[in-house]
Amino acid sequence: MSFVYYFGVLKGDRRKSAPATMENVQQIDFGSLELEAKAQARLSALTMLAGATGTQTEFLQTALRALTLGMDCSLAAVGEIGADGDSVNMVCFINDGEFAKPYVCKLAGTPCAAVYATASADTHVFCKSSLATQFPEDSNLIEMGVESYRAEAFTSPDGRRVGHVFVADTKPMEHDDTDTAFFRLVSQRIGAEINRWHADQAQKEERLLLQTIVDNLPIPITLSDQAGRYILANQKFEEWYGTPVEEVLGLTAREALPIAEEQLEIREMMEADVLSSGEVRRREETKKLADGQDHYVIVTKFPVRDSAGNIIGFGSTTMDITDRRKNETALQEAKERAESASRAKSEFLANMSHELRTPLNSIIGLSEVMLEGIFGTLNPKYIEYVNDINVSGEHLLDVITDILDISKIEAGETDLEESVLNIPDIVRSALRLAYNRTQDKRDWTAIDIPQDFPHLMADKRLVKQILVNLLTNAIKFTPDDGDVGVKARIGDDGGVEIVVSDTGVGIAAEDIPRALEPFGQVRNRPELTHGGTGLGLPLSKKFVELHGGVLRIESAPNKGTQVFVTFPPERTTRVG
């Protein structure tokens, strides 16, 4: 409202009433003067706000001074909702030009509660007067004598009300649209600055977290922009190259590190390839590090992309594999030495076996001549001794033959002489040899193989030797009242499977691997201590593997043993 007052002109020492004419009356419009002063104050406030800089506290203090100036009020504050949702952290508070320390207040019973009421779509709250009467529980308002209140909530980027700005005064406030517009403008500017500060803090914390993780990695890692300038490096990088991280940031490897020109060129080509192809690249190389030693390393370069998927730089990691290379070299040398020793052993055994077989054949042949009495009859005692010589010679010949077979297999000199085998015939032949070997006259082995069973493409001598070895063990370790059996079947994959089973003493599960090793025998059980070299099972296993098959044992003490010999399906042959 505009108020107009008229003042008369004083003449002499008598006040006379003057006619209301423009010539002798001065008209003053106080409403216009008030508006002009308010506008000038708000212009000054906005200028002050526009120049606000410094820390968050410095900015907020400047903003609140500008707000009290523009709103012509004594009190203003900025609050942020607490994590519990029931309290507000007053981060900046001014009263009559003086700033108070930040404090926390409960929302309940205060006008601030209306600001965060989600039921209201409007984020602006205005109370013209009688504030203490409306909020009798707010002791702070009553103590400060606050009469009127205006507040505006500001929101986070996801739309949540996270804080508010308010002004208050000890006199009533008029509800004016220009006041509201100015107040909202300043409040939203303050809210935007607080949101930006929180975003900066979150970004700093994320970067600090990333740097902490990166610094504790056991390998050097760096990030570079497209020009190859370092934008991040970790402590391990500093340890390796002896250059402080802060001294390399903003520089390229060529500018920052003591690297030979040849390696720099390879490095730059690798980085250009990563940037152009967008793919990870790796290479092994030798680096001289801060310790002055050459190290074998694996360098990995990978592309770094922005949220839109555009390549904005590349990363690099370096792994020291010096110890691994040394271990690999040592293992390779040890492997070569072991292979050389194994070849020497196999060659020695093969040569010795050949050398031993010749005189052994003579001993066996001569003992047989003496037993047959070709050159005269021997007395019973000599016959007993000569028979022992013959049996021992045959046994030693079998041992030498086994050793020779093992040596040939380990030397890779065993060739398969394959033919089509009739499984029932080969089983019966092997069984006769097993009985002869064990000198067991009983004939109670059950054979469960159909006469029309498919044939097997394999080496006849080796398959027979497999069966002889398995049957010999089964007969040897099965008591007189036990059972030994052989059966054959076609597996699910079409391969031939032969199973030799017995109800003998059995083997503990933990002893099976030892029994399958050359010269490995189970010595911790008296009932398993029989004559033999411990080559039967290992030889059988190797013969099966030469055919591409598998030998598997299932056994338990005093529950017997089952040995499964499985051949691959391509060896199954049907003869029509």
Image: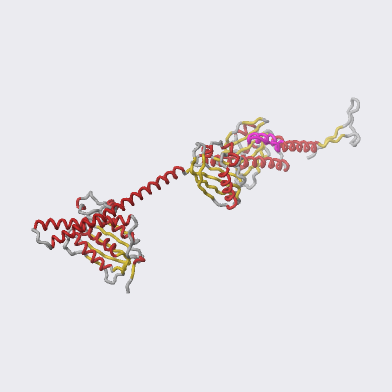
The correct choice, above or below, for 194 with respect to 341 in the image is above
Whether the magenta-drawn stretch holds residue 85 is answered as no
The residue shown at (52%, 44%) is 317
Residue 300 place in picture, x, y as percent: 52, 47
Whether the magenta-drawn stretch holds residue 50 is answered as yes
The C terminus appears in which quarter of the rendering? bottom left
Picture mark count: 0
Taken as a whole, is the magenta stretch helix, strand or loop?
A: helix
Residue 198 occupies quadrant: top right
The correct choice, above or below, for 359 with respect to 225 in the image is below
Residue 531 occupies quadrant: bottom left
The residue shown at (25%, 51%) is 521
The residue stretch that appears in magenta? 48-67
Residue 142 place in picture, x, y as percent: 62, 33
Residue 244 place in picture, x, y as percent: 56, 36
How are the residues colored? secondary structure
The residue shown at (19%, 62%) is 435
The correct choice, above or below, for 551 with respect to 118 in the image is below
Q: Residue furthest bottom?
A: 576
Asked whether, in this view, residue 360 is left or right of residue 50, the answer is left
Q: Nearer the viewer, residue 122 or 440?
A: 440
**Could one spot residue 550 in this view of the protein?**
yes
Residue 149 place in picture, x, y as percent: 66, 38
